[in-house]
Amino acid sequence: MQFNRIKFQWIWRVVSAVGGGGLICLLMVVNTYADTVAAEQFHQRAISAYTAGNIDDAKSLFADALKEDDKYIPAYLARGYILQYERNYQAAVDDFSKVIELDSSRHEAWFRRGIEYFNLGEFEKSVADFEQYAEFRPEQKPFLWQLGIAYYYTGQHQEGRQLFESHQNVNSHDVENAVWHFLCVSKLEGFEAARKALISLDGDTRVPMMQVYALFKGYGTEEDVLKAAHAGTAVDGGLIRQSFYAHLYLGLYHEAKGDADKSFDYMLKAAQHYKSNGYMGEVARVHRDWLKNKNKTSVDPPSTVSK
């Protein structure tokens, strides 16, 4: 009823002002305005439902908002966030793509779609979206470690190296940044060169990250990493999280060393046995699948040299 009153008020005004000649075009404006108002109300109800923990109701209300106005960007964006949280990767890509189609200046949609393209293993598209986001927000590029990781998978190791070096300037306590920098350098110059170029840091309080750092630096061992991860005092999932990071970075360590079997074994445990719900948990899953695909597509030539 409220929307009908709005329409009648506008119709009365435009008829009084311009007569019947322009009425059809103006009625289209009135209808569009009313549809947008209706979409906004559904959107607000969806936000309330989501805040109350009623996720399915929220998604249904977002869909209702888009039935009223299929160009209502806030509903696509908010629903995309929910789909992202639910790991519905392709559906999230679709919603963020719609936002970009309607308004390409919405930089958060480029960033979010870049994440989902990475989760789908579409690394080139992920890099393109993160780079577009960085064009909108150049001051954020040093913080964009997600782009650095995506560069590793596209083989843009020099770009990755530079990104992680810039990230060090804004985050000097992150062993993970140092390790991904190591991985890029190792692809460019070899394992020992990467060890010499390993970024110095101020310390990382997370267990077992300093043991991971020592391993990559050359004065620690795998056993040190695993012992620290499993022998801590963390509770409420903390030990699982520690074990996840231990296995993730042991997998990456053996990849840098060229031991594909050990790398895959550790990554499999990180992705499945010690599964993490965070961004790096997705990296472990994506890396596991990436290794599987590499093994499927690589064909070793027959050896003519006895071992």
Image (cartoon, rainbow, N blue to C red):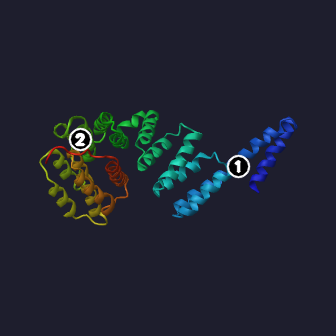
Quadrant where the N terminus is found in the figure: bottom right
Label 1 residue SS: helix
The reply, left or right, for residue 196 in relation to residue 97 is left
Is residue 306 or residue 104 the one in the foreground? 306
Q: Does residue 236 sit above or below 224 in this rendering?
A: below
Tell me the residue at 18%/56% (across/down). 225
The reply, left or right, for residue 163 in relation to residue 74 is left
- Front position among marks 1 and 2: 2
Total labels drawn: 2
Per the image, the residue denoted by label 1 is 35
Does residue 205 show up? no
Residue 13 position in % (x across, y down) = 82, 41
| For marks 1 and 2 on the same chain, the one whose residue lies earlier in the sequence | 1
Per the image, the residue denoted by label 2 is 182
* Residue at mark 1 to residue at mark 2: CA–CA distance: 54 Å
The reply, left or right, for residue 96 in relation to residue 146 is right
